């Protein structure tokens, strides 16, 4: 019954969406048909004998299409007149079809919710992209959306996708208890407030109850934007979740958005000479800028010795923030050179007089990341595209932070603007993307990270390593450990590009590379730099003795300062990537 109601709701939504999109066209065609058939029918029913009869039939037709039907036609009704009587009311029925079906299916679906199984629950639809909503709705299972307040138009749009809408306060225990959580597949908490999301998560854990043994653990995906908040809570949330048969996953749109784009636009994938130091321009410090910058630093670790250049375009107050951030992370000096270009608070870019000395010291950037508020981010993106600008960014990719669904930057690439390149302007951050939904529910995008972790599991058994975390199954890992595997897997194309290599699908005529000792050493050096960037992002600092509780590690030093055993670990990490890629039907090759 639940499936039938879901399909009926989807059909109603599709019909309603079609009618809404083409309302004018449908009404015009239906009106013309009704007018023509109505006039034809009256000409048959009452043939005119003079001009007045023609006029009379015309007015009878006008009455007909305005739904003022005669009650007595006096005998049989001609077929054209019968069809005309139906045409106009049919448009009204189609226009209200979705509302009509929803009035029936909505209470039915809510009534069946306590008997549902495998359903997905979402709190915070406004934080999901359209693609994410479609990814949820296309799964063929019931998706329940909770909102404290929702407009009629938004409700119709969401129900048109097949979602069940509950208008209730998710902060109330009674609301969470009504969701039948012991039998649900997943709960997504995607509101804008980290604390509210975590409060709802605690209510959900209490309401999860005793889960049937034949069901997999309930997936609890919580949006937490603040990195330090997430890191500190990771173990606690993981422990609390496991105690209730729940698996915790973290959502962070800002972090995940830029990570996805950096797999396409990392500097080493763009520059012609891999021996050139990578250079990224960062404009502004809005939002979760520290997370975005941490992702950029990791993606620029593509040279065994040369530090990447990270140039901040910031006002005086922001410059002080960057200074304190840098001073608190001295290990970053092994990885990046920080440069600052000051700008006025009312300007998006610095004047040429400030830029000129900087250009004498640094090559043009390979990538620009705009971390300003929505309108300012768009303005800065367009300013960077000025032909002949001193910053040298008139053709480089620009990743611009947006807190809402992008309706502009994605279309500018199709615009024809004289003397200005409008391509590769990409919106990042703000909303939960479809890729995040698919990663949590289907492990899509995590395939290589899972395989990499499985490789470490095997190595733990074979080599006798004392690593409790490495011996756990993927679903048993804390979110921080899963993220560490993702970071290594996502960096693989960047790592091999550092040696002028690329990843390709295995097949006839594709010859896997056999690394020379020099290439292995180069890649091990790059991998160590990536590892430092990842550890520093997670709050680790250098310490002469490793202390996991204080997050201190003696290997947060340049590669040459490592002992031979630690160097071999980095070499083994490269070998592990080659092995994992081969297991997935992919190989590392030399470009022809």
Image: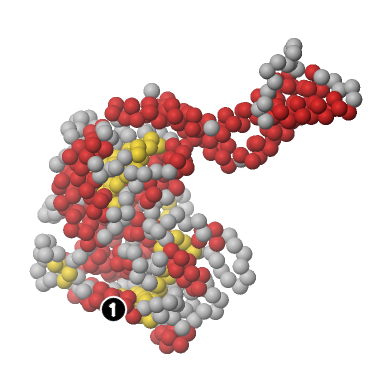
Quadrant (top left, top right, bottom left, bottom right) of the N terminus: top left
Residue density around tag 1, few if under 14, some if 14–19, many if 20 or more, within 10 Å: few
Residue 331 sits above or below residue 66 on the image: below
Where 78 falls versus 225 (above or below)?
above
Residue that extends furthest to the right in the rendered view of this protein: 50
Residue 187, x across and y down, in percent: 29, 42
x and y, in percent, of residue 368 in the image:
43, 70
Q: Give x and y (percent) for residue 331.
A: 22, 74
Write down the quadrant of residue 337 in the picture: bottom left
The spot of residue 482 in percent (x, y) is: 25, 52
Identify the residue at image location x=15%, y=47%.
Answer: 239
Q: Is residue 468 above or below residue 530?
A: above
View extreme (top): residue: 75
**Rendering colour mode:** secondary structure
Q: Is residue 51 visible?
A: yes
Left or right side of 570 for 28: right
Q: Residue at x 65, y 36 (%)?
A: 27
Q: Which residue is mark 1?
A: 320
In this view, 588 is above or below 327: above
Question: In the picture, residue 412 is in which quadrant?
Answer: bottom right
Q: Quick check: can you spot residue 37?
A: no
- In the drawing, does residue 114 fall left or right of residue 92? left
Badge 1 marks a residue whose secondary structure is helix
Relative depth, front residue between 483 and 387: 387
Q: How many marks?
A: 1
Residue drawn at (67%, 26%) of the image: 68
Pick the front one: 169 or 542: 169
Is 293 situated left or right of 379 in this image?
left
Left or right, residue 528 beside residue 147 = left
User: Which residue corresponds to the image point at 40% horizontal and 68% vertical from the top-left?
Assistant: 372
């Amino acid at each position: 019954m639940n499936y039938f109601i879901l399909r009926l709701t989807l059909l109603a939504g599709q019909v309603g969406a079609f009618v809404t999109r083409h309302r004018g066209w449908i009404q015009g065609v239906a009106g013309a048909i009704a007018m023509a058939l109505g006039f034809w029918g009256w000409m048959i029913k009452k043939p005119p004998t003079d001009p007045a009869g023609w006029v009379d039939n015309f007015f009878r037709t006008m009455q007909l299409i305005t739904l003022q039907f005669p009650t007595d036609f006096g005998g049989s009704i001609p077929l054209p007149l019968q069809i005309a009587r139906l045409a106009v009311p049919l448009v009204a029925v189609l226009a209200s079809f979705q509302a009509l079906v929803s009035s029936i299916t909505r209470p039915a679906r809510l009534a069946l919710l306590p008997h549902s199984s495998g359903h997905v629950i979402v709190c915070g639809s406004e934080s999901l992209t359209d693609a994410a909503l479609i990814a949820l709705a296309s799964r063929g299972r019931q998706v329940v959306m909770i909102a404290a307040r929702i407009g009629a138009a938004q409700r119709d749009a969401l129900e048109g996708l097949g979602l069940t809408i509950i208008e209730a306060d998710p902060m109330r225990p009674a609301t969470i208890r009504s969701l039948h959580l012991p039998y649900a597949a997943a709960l997504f908490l995607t509101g804008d407030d980290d604390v509210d999301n975590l409060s709802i998560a605690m209510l959900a854990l209490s309401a999860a109850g005793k889960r049937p043994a034949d069901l997999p653990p309930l997936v609890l995906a919580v949006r937490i934007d603040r990195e330090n908040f997430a890191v500190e809570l990771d173990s606690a949330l993981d422990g609390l979740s496991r105690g209730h048969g729940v698996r915790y996953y973290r959502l962070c749109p800002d972090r995940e958005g830029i990570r996805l784009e950096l797999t396409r636009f990392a500097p080493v994938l763009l520059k012609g000479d891999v021996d050139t130091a990578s250079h990224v321009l960062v404009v502004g410090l809005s939002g979760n800028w520290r997370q975005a910058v941490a992702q950029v630093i990791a993606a620029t670790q593509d040279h065994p010795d040369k530090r990447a250049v990270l140039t901040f375009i910031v006002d005086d107050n922001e410059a002080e923030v960057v200074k304190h951030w840098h001073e608190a992370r001295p290990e970053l000096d092994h990885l990046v050179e920080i440069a600052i270009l000051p700008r006025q608070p009312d300007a998006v870019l610095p004047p040429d007089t400030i830029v000129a000395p900087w250009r004498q010291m640094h090559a043009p950037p390979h990538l620009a990341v705009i971390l300003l508020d929505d309108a300012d981010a768009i303005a800065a993106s367009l300013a960077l595209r000025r032909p002949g600008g001193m910053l040298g960014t008139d053709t480089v990719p620009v990743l611009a932070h947006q807190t809402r669904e992008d309706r502009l930057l994605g279309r500018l690439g199709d615009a024809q603007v004289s003397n200005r390149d409008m391509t590769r302007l990409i919106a990042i951050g703000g909303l939960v993307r479809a890729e995040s939904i698919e990663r949590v529910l289907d492990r899509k995008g995590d395939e290589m990270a899972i395989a990499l972790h499985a490789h470490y599991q095997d190595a733990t058994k074979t080599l006798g390593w004392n690593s409790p975390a490495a011996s756990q199954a993927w679903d048993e890992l804390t979110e921080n450990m899963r993220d560490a595997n993702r970071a290594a897997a996502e960096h693989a194309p960047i790592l091999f590009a550092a040696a002028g290599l690329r990843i390709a699908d295995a097949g006839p005529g594709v010859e896997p590379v056999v690394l020379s000792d020099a290439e292995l050493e180069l890649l091990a050096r790059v991998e160590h730099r990536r590892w430092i960037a990842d550890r520093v992002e997670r709050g680790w600092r250098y310490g002469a003795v490793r202390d996991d509780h204080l997050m201190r590690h003696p290997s947060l030093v340049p590669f040459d300062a490592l002992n031979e055993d630690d160097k071999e670990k980095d070499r083994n990490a490269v070998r592990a990537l080659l092995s994992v890629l081969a297991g997935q039907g992919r190989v590392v090759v030399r470009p022809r």
